């Protein structure tokens, strides 16, 4: 776990440590403004987790594209380098994830039994940026570390995880009315210092400020636990982005990757 205040400098350090591990690169590769194509280290077990990265299964073959806003890094298994290098050679940050390249990457990875996900924006929050919101009238929010009182929408938190993302929930903030639990924000420990937020609210209770209240509650709990919270959205989920921004989250990186979706 992190030590000391989880300020912007600490958040940036944790994110860069994780991304350099997952991209098999150095910090300069992420920050120098250029786009780099890097070969994934082939020496470790392809089904193992990447040391220093998030606790996700490592796909085989491996493809991961990341930008922190200045240039970017494309990391692929050795056998993919023959087409990845010419596809990305000389491109700019904005060209790195443009549709024509995403389409070609997706087609090539589909032939290998993998689906390409993203690009996904990832948001982070530091303690000095957190904006906290109370539960709206008629609701209470409780922090829990159990698996009881789960409703159908809460179950979507687990179902929305992509292949290989099998990290477990640590604790959750639950929104409750006279009907019982109607929404929650949980966190998964995706790494030693990095927890991901997952939110689910029943449809009739959306648009009332519950998303902000749950997000701020689970973010505060994550800080108290000594971890850095991050929040994932799809590129078109503006409602979720607004929730993240209103609570003090800011965009930290964009990620596109491939995972094996074939039945085991």
Image: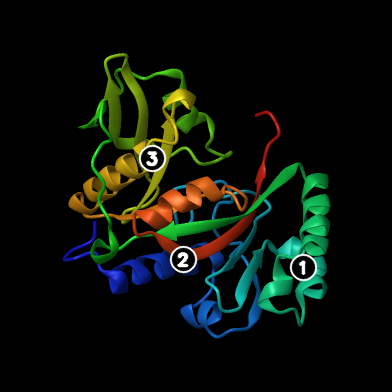
Residue farthest toward the bottom in the current orientation of the protein: 32
Q: Which mark is residue 33?
A: none
Q: Say which residue appears at 66% left-offset and 76% top-offset.
A: 93
Distance from disc 2 to disc 1, alpha carbons, whole Å, reads 25 Å
**How many callouts does the rendering have?**
3
Q: Is residue 94 above or below residue 63?
A: below
Q: Quadrant of the N terminus?
A: bottom left
Spot occupied by residue 237 in the image (x, y as percentages of width and height): 57, 47
From this viewpoint, is residue 51 visible? no
Q: Observer-nearest residue: 136 or 35?
A: 136
- The percent position of residue 70, horizontal first and vertical second, equals 56, 79
Q: Which residue is mark 3?
A: 211
Contact (Cβ within 8 Å) of mark 3 with mark 1:
no
Distance of label 3 from label 1 (alpha carbons)? 40 Å
Residue pointed to by mark 1: 84
Q: Earlier in the sequence, mark 3 or mark 2?
A: 3
User: For the point 68% across and 53% down, which residue is it?
Assistant: 61
Q: Disc 2 designates what residue?
A: 252
Indicate which disc, 2 or 1, sits on the residue closer to the N terminus: 1
Percent across and percent down for residue 156 are 49, 28
Of marks 3 and 1, the one in the foreground = 3
Nearest the eye: 142 or 79 = 142
Q: Residues within 10 Å of mark 2 (few under 14, many from 20)?
A: some
Cβ atoms at labels 3 and 2 below 8 Å apart: no
Label 3, label 2: how far apart the Cα atoms are: 21 Å
Whether residue 152 is visible to the viewer of this picture, yes or no, is yes
Mark 1 Cα shell of 10 Å, populated few (<14), some (14-19), many (≥20)? many
Q: Earlier in the sequence, mark 3 or mark 1?
A: 1
Regarding mark 2 in the picture, which secondary structure is present there?
A: strand
> Badges 2 and 1: C-beta atoms under 8 Å apart?
no
Assign a secondary structure to mark 3: helix
- Whether residue 250 sits left or right of residue 193 in the image: it is right
């Amino acid at each position: 776990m992190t030590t000391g205040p989880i300020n912007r400098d600490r958040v940036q350090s944790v994110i860069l440590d994780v991304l350099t591990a997952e991209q098999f690169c150095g910090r300069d590769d992420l920050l120098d403004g250029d786009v780099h194509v890097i070969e994934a280290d082939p020496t470790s077990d392809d089904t193992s987790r990447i040391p220093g990265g998030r606790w996700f299964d490592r796909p085989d073959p491996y493809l991961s594209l990341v930008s922190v806003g200045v240039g970017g890094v494309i990391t692929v298994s050795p056998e993919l380098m023959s087409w990845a290098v010419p596809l990305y050679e000389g491109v700019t940050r904005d060209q790195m994830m443009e549709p024509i390249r995403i389409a070609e990457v997706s087609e090539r990875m589909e032939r290998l039994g993998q689906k390409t996900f993203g690009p996904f924006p990832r948001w982070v929050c530091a303690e000095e940026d957190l904006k906290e919101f109370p539960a709206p009238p008629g609701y209470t929010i409780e922090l829990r570390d159990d698996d009881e009182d789960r409703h159908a929408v809460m179950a979507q938190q687990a179902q929305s995880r992509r292949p290989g993302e099998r990290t477990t929930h640590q604790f959750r903030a639950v929104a409750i009315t006279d009907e019982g639990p109607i929404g929650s924000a949980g966190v998964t420990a995706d790494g030693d210092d990095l927890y991901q937020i997952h939110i689910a609210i029943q449809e009739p209770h959306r648009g009332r400020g519950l998303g902000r209240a749950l997000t701020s509650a689970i973010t505060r709990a994550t800080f108290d636990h000594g971890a850095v919270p991050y929040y994932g959205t799809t590129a078109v989920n503006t409602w979720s982005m607004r929730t993240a921004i209103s609570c003090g989250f800011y965009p930290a990186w964009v990620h596109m990757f491939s995972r094996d979706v074939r039945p085991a």
